[in-house]
């Protein structure tokens, strides 16, 4: 599924052959905003997620004439006592020269629309509430959706119903894929 905006940006599922390019984008973007150590940490997360079986992660990109401009990764979040289909969004990166131009929001919208079309019920993420609210995420409590790890910033725990129905609490403990199951990310 491809779409293009007026700025000649193309949004699509990302080809796994571009793993190094994707990981480099995450590392460079986070190093520029959060420092070299955070860049290395998020770059390593991206590499590990991209090495997971293709059924375990969904990767979407934004590309312009200069190449990869943004990338997002979704992976399953399972609940022992709830059958709803839930995916966690992490990480998200937009090339520094394309930030503030709506690329991230358009990429998130593309990814969320794809999830919705694939029958996913809920998307969760852990980040800046103001940024993610622009595409419909809202702050939630850990009682509504129990994260797989203790959160260092509970105010950043966010969710979005993809069904059009109000977000009902998910039942039971959650489990993420191995690549995300590290306290450093939570």
Image: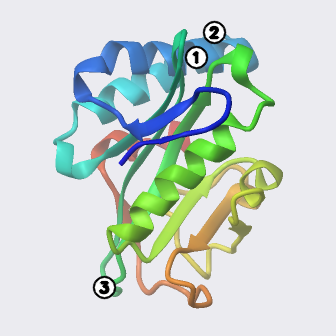
The residue tagged 3 is 83
Q: Mark 3 or 2, which is nearer the eye?
A: 3
Q: Secondary structure at mark 1?
A: helix
Residue 16 point in image, percent of width and height: 24, 28
Q: Secondary structure at mark 3?
A: loop
Q: Earlier in the sequence, mark 3 or mark 1?
A: 1
Q: Residue at x 41, y 59 (%)?
A: 114
Can the viewer see residue 142? yes
**83 or 181: nearer the viewer:** 83
The residue tagged 1 is 39
Q: Residue at x 66, y 61 (%)?
A: 157
* Other-residue count near label 2 (Cα within 10 Å), few / some / many at <14 / 14–19 / ≥20: some
Q: Is residue 131 left or right of residue 114?
A: right
The residue tagged 2 is 36
Looking at the rendering, which quadrant does residue 22 occupy? top left
Callout 3 touching callout 2 (CB < 8 Å): no
What colour scheme has been applied to the protein in the rendered image? rainbow
Q: Residue at x 58, y 17 (%)?
A: 39
Residue 25 point in image, percent of width and height: 51, 17
Q: Earlier in the sequence, mark 3 or mark 2?
A: 2
Q: In the image, is residue 39 above or below residue 127?
A: above
């Amino acid at each position: 599924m491809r779409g293009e905006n007026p700025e000649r940006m193309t949004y699509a599922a990302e080809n796994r052959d571009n793993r190094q390019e994707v990981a480099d984008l995450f590392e460079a973007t986070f190093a520029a905003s959060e420092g070299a150590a955070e860049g290395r940490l998020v770059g390593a997360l991206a590499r590990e997620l991209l090495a997971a079986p293709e059924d375990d992660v969904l990767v979407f990109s934004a590309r312009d004439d200069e190449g990869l401009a943004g990338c997002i990764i979704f992976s399953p979040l399972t609940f022992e006592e709830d059958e709803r289909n839930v995916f966690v969004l992490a990480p998200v990166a937009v090339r520094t020269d394309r930030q503030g131009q709506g690329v991230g929001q358009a990429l998130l919208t593309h990814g969320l629309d794809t999830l919705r079309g694939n029958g996913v019920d809920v998307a969760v993420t852990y980040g800046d509430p103001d940024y993610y609210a622009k595409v419909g995420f809202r702050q939630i409590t850990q009682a509504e959706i129990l994260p797989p790890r203790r959160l260092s910033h509970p105010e950043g725990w966010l969710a979005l119903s993809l069904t059009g129905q109000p977000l009902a609490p998910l039942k039971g403990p959650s489990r993420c894929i191995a690549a995300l199951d590290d306290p450093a990310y939570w």
